Amino acid sequence: MTVIPLAVHSPRVIEQVLRSHGWDAGRAADAAGGIHPAAFLLTGLEPVVLQALVGYAGPLGLGVITGGDWAVLAGSASRMGALARPWVVPAPLADVAVQIGMAMPPAAPAEWRTARGAVSLAAPVLVGILNVTPDSFSDGGRYESVAAALERVARLRADGAAIVDVGGESTRPGRTEPVPLDEELRRVVPVIAALVRENPDLLVSVDTVKSAVARAALDAGAAIVNDVSALRLDSSMASVVAAAGAGVILMHSRGDILELASYAHAEYPAGIVPTVVHELAESVRMALATGIRADAIVVDPGLGFSKTVPQNLQLLDQLGSLLSLGRPVMVGPSRKRFLTGGPATTPGERDAATQAACVLAWERGARLFRVHDVAGARDALALAHSVTETDSSR
């Protein structure tokens, strides 16, 4: 007899073992998903619910840790699913069962719908950054002219960018004045129009919190709105996106446009991860209520925005929690200070750390990656994708 330990950091480990023993791909994937570990934190529980939970979850093979009015519940996904059945659990656990069922991650979306077609999420999707601003922290002033922007986009596409994200207002720390509407329109619209004219098959995203800029950019040919306020700062943004049938990226942040990259709102008494998930869930509900289709929504945890260095690292580590929202996840760690613990390095010196962050995010479920150095991220993510796609039965 032999006993071989298996790493269980992802379901594919079990899936590959089963396939190597003759199981077909579908059956192996289903079984691996069922045996993969799942864990939840439950808060605000009444004593009668805690008592019922301990008594019911234990015989199901689930681990329960309790204290005060909370519990941590852990076990395989299939056994967790057996708890998420409100019609069979004891009456005090009916609401727990419903909430567990809603929190269990659904099947990952296969594509993302935009105003100019769908984006496949089968492999990493690289979003190249094009700042047409004089003051962006990494490349401010380099691509303000249409000619310079076109040249930059040619390089981004050659390096592997599937989407180009055009921004006319910097969110760098330390800004003291917002960009006026007319100025942002002047910076963004001619560039987007030229990009679409010269690259008819290119998907362009506009990075803005202003609905008027989003509307003009979409009219000029953009397909996606990247709103770093997740619809908070302009009440008309959601209706503009819905009317255009555009894709939308909802990024978690707090505060007004001048506070986004500061620590002014970096207090998370309930914990950084559950709070970000909850606040993004509210943004998703707002989008759906305004008529934006579910398959047009991408969520972004907002790394580097309204979060301290430890909070950013914890959020990156637990990025998989966002999968419970049922939408594709984009990350934008590119050249941000938290990657190296502070401002001691220059932005360009953080590309290697950016690539590491992207690989970690891919492992945890992210599928879109907004970066400055597209070639470096492309190579790092190509390796990560190859590892996750390895078929041990061959």
Image: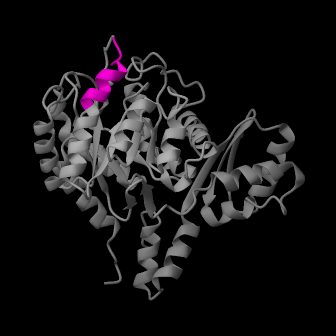
**Observer-nearest residue: 222 or 368?**
222
Horizontally, is 120 left or right of 375 in the view? right
Whether residue 313 is visible, yes or no, is no
> What is the residue that sits farthest to the bottom in this orientation?
22
Residue 304 point in image, percent of width and height: 36, 30
Residue 203 point in image, percent of width and height: 30, 52
**Rendered view: 122 above or below 29:** above
Q: How is the image coloured?
A: one colour
Part of the protein shown in magenta = 177-187
* Residue at the image position 39 percent from the left and 17 percent from the top: 258
Is residue 268 magenta-colored? no
Residue 18 point in image, percent of width and height: 46, 80
Which SS type dominates the magenta stretch?
helix
Which quadrant would the C terminus be assigned to in this image?
bottom left
**Observer-nearest residue: 191 or 357?**
191
Whether residue 7 is visible, yes or no, is yes
> What is the residue that sits farthest to the top in this orientation?
176
* Residue at the image position 27 percent from the left and 66 percent from the top: 386
